[in-house]
């Protein structure tokens, strides 16, 4: 017998989007504070190379990835079955947002 899959409504999507934005903003500010001592503040120098901020970039991305994976693992056990279908979409979007957050981190 085929399993009947329940679809989530637009309200569940909006709640998920709102929680996603709150999570990403909180993660950004927490990781900004955590990586504040790494790298150079003044990047507009003629002899500037990317090496000085490479450590800050890698640490930021790895910590962001760790936060996202932990959040997915926790949520996948806590969410009802009908809402779990959205979880992987938010996970993939969060991976892309992690790279986009490097722009305000260094500006």
Image (cartoon, rainbow, N blue to C red):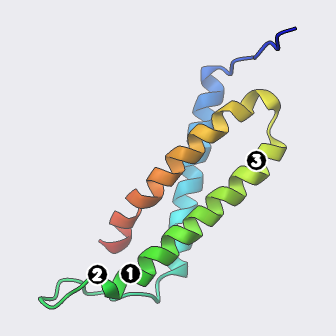
Q: Which image quadrant is residue 24 in? A: bottom right
In screen coordinates, is 13 left or right of 93?
A: right
Q: Residue at x 11, y 88 (%)?
A: 46
The quadrant of the rendering that contains the N terminus is top right
The count of marks equals 3
In 3D space, how far apart are the residues under numbered discs 2 and 3 (Cα atoms)? 36 Å
State the image coordinates of residue 69 (x, y, percent, origin top left): 67, 57
In 3D space, how far apart are the residues under numbered discs 3 and 1 (Cα atoms)? 31 Å
In 3D space, how far apart are the residues under numbered discs 2 and 1 (Cα atoms)? 6 Å
Q: Residue at x 79, y 39 (%)?
A: 79
State the image coordinates of residue 80 (x, y, percent, origin top left): 82, 33
- Could you say which disc has been placed on residue 50 in the image? 2
Per the image, label 2 sits on a secondary structure element best described as loop
Q: Which image quadrant is residue 50 in? A: bottom left
Pick the residue in front: 78 or 95. Answer: 95
In screen coordinates, is 33 left or right of 2?
A: left
In screen coordinates, is 2 left or right of 24?
A: right
Pick the residue in front: 8 or 14. Answer: 8
- Local crowd at mark 2 within 10 Å, few (<14), some, or many (≥20)? few
Marks 2 and 3 close (CB-CB < 8 Å): no
37 is higher (above) or lower (below) than 32: below
The quadrant of the rendering that contains the C terminus is bottom left
State the image coordinates of residue 39 (x, y, percent, origin top left): 38, 87
Per the image, label 3 sits on a secondary structure element best described as helix
In screen coordinates, is 100 left or right of 17?
A: left
> Of the residues under marks 3 and 1, which one precedes in the sequence?
1
Nearer mark to the viewer, of 3 and 1: 1
- Please give the residue where the numbered disc 3 appears in the rendered image: 75
- Could you say which disc has been placed on residue 54 in the image? 1
Per the image, label 1 sits on a secondary structure element best described as helix
Marks 2 and 1 close (CB-CB < 8 Å): yes
> Of the residues under marks 2 and 3, which one precedes in the sequence?
2
């Amino acid at each position: 017998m085929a399993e009947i899959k329940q679809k989530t409504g637009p309200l569940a999507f909006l709640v998920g989007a709102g929680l996603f934005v709150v999570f990403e903003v909180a993660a950004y500010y927490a990781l900004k504070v955590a990586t504040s001592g790494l790298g150079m503040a003044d990047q507009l120098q003629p002899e500037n190379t990317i090496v000085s901020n490479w450590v800050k970039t890698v640490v930021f991305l790895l910590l962001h990835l760790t936060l996202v994976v932990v959040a997915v693992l926790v949520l996948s056990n806590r969410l009802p079955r009908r809402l779990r279908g959205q979880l992987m979409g938010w996970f993939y979007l969060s991976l892309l947002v992690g790279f986009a957050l490097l722009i305000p981190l260094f500006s």
